[in-house]
Amino acid sequence: MIVMFMGEYHQKIDEKGRLTIPAKLRTELGDNFIVTRGLDGCLFIYRKETWEQIINNYQNLPNIKEARNFMRFFLSGATNLEFDKQGRINISSPLIKYAELKKETVIIGVGDRLEIWSNDKWNNFINENEEDFSKQADYLFSQNIN
Amino acid sequence: MIVMFMGEYHQKIDEKGRLTIPAKLRTELGDNFIVTRGLDGCLFIYRKETWEQIINNYQNLPNIKEARNFMRFFLSGATNLEFDKQGRINISSPLIKYAELKKETVIIGVGDRLEIWSNDKWNNFINENEEDFSKQADYLFSQNIN
DNA sequence: TTTAAAACCATATTATCCCATGTAAAATTG
DNA sequence: CAATTTTACATGGGATAATATGGTTTTAAA
């Protein structure tokens, strides 16, 4: 992984569907990237290189129904986007609808991708899972004492 | 473990989210480090080397929902930071919110990491756990640690 | 000809950098 | 050893540049 996306950023999406990507993330993204329906009700943004790797990996999956359906979901939602002069992207209305994006939007870095969440969904996510996370973290942190 | 962080330091965070790291700790931290959501309501600061070790352990988690969620929580809370000319770091507002940081702040050294606590939380923590510490110590030291 | 989307422009907000002051520790000198 | 000076460090505030965001015009498409 060349780029490791991290952090949480709060941005406003306007009524034209335009969303500013924070400057720091822009430089890490480059100007060739893909937005698509993500898992768990958010959108994913991948660098082009990462996207191509993912697609390659799925080419090798057996031609079973589950794999076919997943590819439909993943590819039909995918769009090649660019920044406008002010560093914004234009999110299509099907994707806005899918992620239930309102004005208040959260962009997070998760390793090889960015995720776009509606503020409400993200808060729910954090609140519902916080306790589990500390348990998991207790476990995981106890693993790396060398 | 090359560096062993120790000690308790009381610093003030200003209304811009700037926090001075004591000079002694600065030299031990180097100028490449990561701040992230920690456990029990505080923030963790890791040297870059330590951080990379931790990440390596997580790379190989399977792509199941629990692992995905945990990575979201973990990476979205992480930021790569640097010192300003006066030796301060700039803590992002989601992290300030998470750790409920007010003006009075406590920085403690805990082995391979630093922890940032709000003064109130730290006092509560000490008060609530003081009696237990001796029991916990008895338990831990009886486990033969070699 | 109408509508919508994309490019452009302008302003408001935020973050970053730099400097000033206050305070405590250390060092130097009588 | 005490007193005074010097240095380092912590903390606050203001100016400037970068960024986010809203609105307007132009272009293209239906």
Image: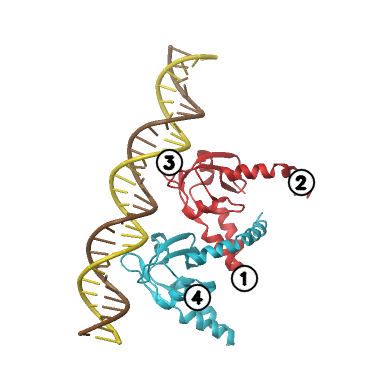
Chain colours: A cyan, B red, C brown, D yellow
The percent coordinates of residue A130 (x first, y second) are: 60, 60
Whether residue A132 is visible, yes or no, is yes
The percent coordinates of residue B88 (x first, y second) are: 46, 44
**Identity, as a three-letter code, of the amino acid under mark 4:** Gln
* Camera-side residue of B90 and A96: A96
Q: Tell me whether the residue at label 3 lies in contact with that at label 1, contact meaning CB atoms closer than 8 angstroms.
A: no
Cα distance in 3D space between marks 3 and 1: 43 Å
Upstream in the sequence, badge 1 or badge 2? Answer: 1
Q: Secondary structure at mark 1?
A: loop
The percent coordinates of residue B35 (x first, y second) are: 52, 52
Q: Residues within 10 Å of mark 2 (few under 14, many from 20)?
A: few
Q: Which residue appears at 52% of the width and 58% of the height?
A: B77
Q: In the rendered image, which residue does mark 3 sit on?
A: B86
Cα distance in 3D space between marks 4 and 1: 17 Å
The percent coordinates of residue B25 (x first, y second) are: 53, 42
Instruction: Describe residue B32's horizontal placement relative to residue C19 as left or right.
Output: right
Pointer 4 indicates a residue of which chain? A
Cα distance in 3D space between marks 1 and 2: 34 Å
Cα distance in 3D space between marks 2 and 3: 41 Å
Q: Tell me whether the residue at label 1 lies in contact with that at label 2, contact meaning CB atoms closer than 8 angstroms.
A: no
Q: In the rendered image, which residue does mark 2 sit on?
A: B141
**Identity, as a three-letter code, of the amino acid under mark 1:** Pro
Whether residue B46 is visible, yes or no, is no
Q: Relative to C28, is B73 above or below?
A: below
**Identity, as a three-letter code, of the amino acid under mark 3:** Gln
Q: In the rendered image, which residue does mark 1 sit on?
A: B62
Pointer 1 indicates a residue of which chain? B
Q: In the rendered image, which residue does mark 4 sit on?
A: A53
Upstream in the sequence, badge 3 or badge 1? Answer: 1
